[in-house]
Image: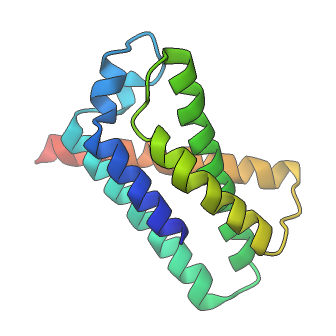
Amino acid sequence: MAIVALAVHNAEELVRDLPGWQAERPWLPGGAVYGDQAQFAGALAIVTGAVLVLAVAAVAGRTAWSAPVLVCVGYALLVNAMGHVLLSVVTWSLMPGVITSVLVLVPVAVLLARTLPPVRWTASTVLVTLVAAVGLVLGSLVIAALVGAVL
């Protein structure tokens, strides 16, 4: 469910040209990290693939870490969604990804958080979740830029 939500959300970001939207707003931080549309598509594929592998491993393995990791994925989706809403308000425009953020990511994130066993939130749990989410996104953008430069 989370992977389908992420894939739909990433498709909206790609179809609605998030790098172009960002380029039209150079006063927003982070514009340099998106690259062009092809690099961004590569980054989205990497993120979606990585979350898919993580979700399949968590569901198939049903280990002690499975439910907490899936809950943390849900919260990462929620933080991503809130970022889209916030930047849409700040820019007075619909940021690519905001529609699926509200209609897909938020409900799926809430469903994950409410149906899976609760995570004991500690400073380290919050830090690991944030670092993993940000690291995955930034890492995928860097990898996609490097692959684009080589090809």
* Apparent side of residue 13 relative to residue 103 in the rendered image (left or right): left
Q: Residue at x 32, y 58 (%)?
A: 45
Q: Residue at x 76, y 74 (%)?
A: 115
Is 129 placed above or below 17 here?
A: below
* Apparent side of residue 146 relative to residue 105 in the rendered image (left or right): left
Is 15 placed above or below 3 here?
A: above
Can residue 118 be seen here?
A: yes
Q: Nearer the viewer, residue 1 or 36?
A: 1
Q: Nearer the viewer, residue 101 or 71?
A: 101
Is 23 placed above or below 141 here?
A: above
Can residue 135 be seen here?
A: no
Q: Residue 117, position in %: x, y?
A: 82, 75
Q: Residue 147, position in %: x, y?
A: 22, 49
* Number of callouts: 0
* Apparent side of residue 111 relative to residue 119 in the rendered image (left or right): left
Q: Residue 42, position in %: x, y?
A: 27, 51
Q: Residue at x 53, y 46 (%)?
A: 101
**Residue furthest out toward the top:** 27
Q: Residue 34, position in %: x, y?
A: 34, 33
Toward which corner of the image does residue 38 lie, by quadrant? top left
Q: Residue at x 38, y 31 (%)?
A: 33
Is 6 placed above or below 83 here?
A: below
* Apparent side of residue 127 relative to residue 85 in the rendered image (left or right): right
Toward which corner of the image does residue 89 lie, by quadrant? top right
**Residue furthest out toward the left:** 151
Report the colour scheme.
Answer: rainbow
